[in-house]
Image (cartoon, grey):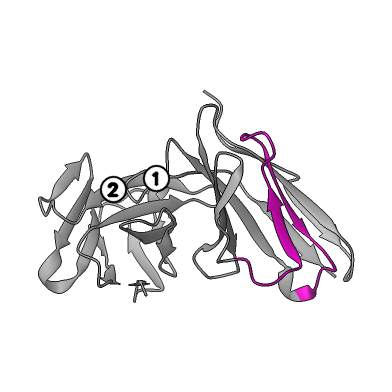
Amino acid sequence: AQKVTQAQTEISVVEKEDVTLDCVYETRDTTYYLFWYKQPPSGELVFLIRRNSFDEQNEISGRYSWNFQKSTSSFNFTITASQVVDSAVYFCALSVSGYSTLTFGKGTMLLVSP
Amino acid sequence: GAGVSQTPSNKVTEKGKYVELRCDPISGHTALYWYRQSLGQGPEFLIYFQGTGAADDSGLPNDRFFAVRPEGSVSTLKIQRTERGDSAVYLCASSWGQGEGYEQYFGPGTRLTVT
């Protein structure tokens, strides 16, 4: 069975601080994909990134960066110079070979204050 | 282009009643998913369709829940004899194809409240 753990329930930062959201996953499959989604107060989940299990290169997109480490089964997400608009719940998710469905973590609520 | 749409956005019903929740996926997306999200939790998978057929319904909690996608586009999630424990946000998502690598695009959800 698959499992995604987001140990941080809620994080509060002040604008312009850097913040890292942790994600640890469990699976016995060697082929899998990891995702991050953002859920703003409006409620609609927004896709941020997808990584496959064979690509451990870190990725940067603007103020966002992702660190994938198979050795620790982690896929952490860092926001640099956070902004108020980053306030949302962030979910890490996993899908494994042969299955289209996503297994989500419980999410981390990020509050960025001015 | 238009995203995934869901109707109604909110539904309040009495315990024991029947409800239908509708999902209109992104045009051209062949795979369609239903998830349920309880307060403070991540979405949990219910069922997914590839085309008109249910490819995996292992997440449906019991036989009161049923979903259809008769023409391979719009889908309806049906809940019979609703219970208070069914209260949650029901999310629909679609993707270009099936398989573990496709990102899923989510709709705004239907908030179901059973009184």
Residue B52 in sight in this render: yes
Q: Furthest residue to the top?
A: B1
Q: Magenta segment range?
A: B60-84
What x and y, as percent, mark residue A31? 22, 58
Determine the CA span between mark 2 and mark 1. Answer: 8 Å
In the depicted structure, whether residue B36 falls above or below residue B104: below
Looking at the image, residue A19 sits to the left or right of residue B68; the answer is: left
What x and y, as percent, mark residue A33? 28, 55
Residue at screen point 14% across, 73% down: A72
Q: Secondary structure at mark 2?
A: strand
Residue B50 highlighted magenta (yes or no): no
Q: Amino acid at mark 2?
A: Arg
Residue A80 in sight in this render: no
Q: Which residue is mark 2?
A: A50
Residue at screen point 34% across, 76% down: A7
Between B73 and B52, the one lying in front of the other is: B52
Could you classify mark 1 by the number of other residues whose Cα lies within 10 Å: few (under 14), some (14-19), or many (20 or more)?
some
Residue B64 highlighted magenta (yes or no): yes
